[in-house]
Amino acid sequence: MRPIRTEDDLYDLTRAAAAVATVAGWSKLGLFHLLADGAPRRLDELPADPRALRVTVPVLAHLGLLARDGDTIALTATAQRLHAEGALGLYTTLDTLDDLSRIDEVIAKGGPARTRDGQSKATEGGVREEDVPRARGFMEMLYRRSETSARETARAIAKRLPAGAHVLDVGGGHGRYGRELVELGLRATLFDKSVCVDFAREKHGEALGYLAGDFFRDDLGGPYDAALLSNIVHGFSIEENRRLIARLAKVLKPGGHLVFKDMFLDDFAAHPENAVTFGLTMLFYTNGGQSYTVAEMDALCRAQGFAPVETANFEDYALLFARKGGES
């Protein structure tokens, strides 16, 4: 995002929000699915209000998702690819936009967001175990989007560990990070909720070890040469992270590594963009989560006897490495 310097910059943000809402609306109504074969369709063939179609089609054409010839439209090649990948399935964004419209309530009273009848919308790691279809859909989305980061993260970890070292993938969800570690000659045990473990086992079979439970309370196994927390710490309060790091310190071997993969704020807590905005997601959908600075994570680790963290920066995230016992 660009810094806001003029009134026009504010209008740009408004237009972007309107565009996202349009894509989400078409997604929820299944209109992209109806056009998925790439064949042209007349507007009057689509199950939607004619005037609303005439207004929203130009938005999607401007975004490069629709090709238009008069009253006939078709998905562009880009849109067909994105639909096939599941990336246009943004219907849940409408719920998010509804929540954001009441951000004044959240700022005044604190998060998480609540439904219209007052029920908390907090999740744990984006997953509600009682809603298996939605949890699996969330895992599928994360799996699809993690190919590059899982490979980069695994390579960075493997450089610091001997062949055959055992890594605990804390809250490993879909298991892609653990699988990449195994491909590099390491062992990986995934610890997560039962619904996530079931999903990961379907993806990776017995390539990984699996433990189901609550990583704040249940036996973590071990000892391990490293513990990976990929996109985990942002979902919890500073006190919860303190407790989790203390638990992990006990199951790491001397000299073992604690590895954080996340979107960390800079020292001024103003950049990067993804960490700044993701903090809002945590405010709305967790009980205590937020985006953290590297310094905050470093302080938590040092308090448990870890050496100062080492940082490796990538395009959209950073890796923090803390070695148990301060050994070099």
Image (spheres, rainbow, N blue to C red):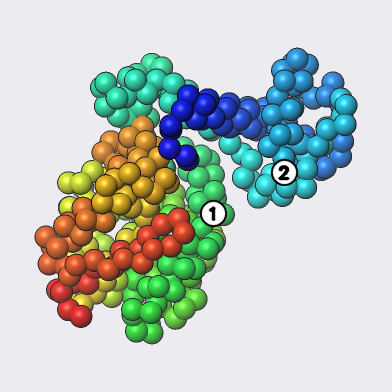
Residue neighbourhood size for the residue with mark 1, other residues' Cα within 10 Å, grouped as few (<14), some (14–19), many (≥20)? few
Q: Position of residue 169 (x, y in %)?
A: 36, 63
- Between 124 and 222, the residue placed more toward the observer is 124
- Lower position in the chain sequence, tag 2 or tag 1: 2
- Dot 2 falls on a residue whose secondary structure is helix
Residue appearing at x 31%, y 66% in the figure: 311
Residue appearing at x 81%, y 37% in the figure: 67
In the rendered image, the quadrant that contains the C terminus is: bottom left
Q: Position of residue 309 (x, y in %)?
A: 24, 66
Q: CA distance from mark 2 to mark 1?
A: 17 Å
Q: Please indicate whether residue 12 sits to the left or right of residue 166 in the image.
A: right
Judging by the rendered image, the residue that carries numbered circle 2 is 79
Q: Considering only vertical position in the picture, is 214 above or below 67?
A: below
Res 39 quadrant in image: top right
Q: Residue furthest front?
A: 6
Judging by the rendered image, the residue that carries numbered circle 1 is 145
Q: Please indicate whether residue 264 sits to the left or right of residue 175 in the image.
A: left
Residue neighbourhood size for the residue with mark 2, other residues' Cα within 10 Å, grouped as few (<14), some (14–19), many (≥20)? many
Q: Position of residue 59 (x, y in %)?
A: 69, 29
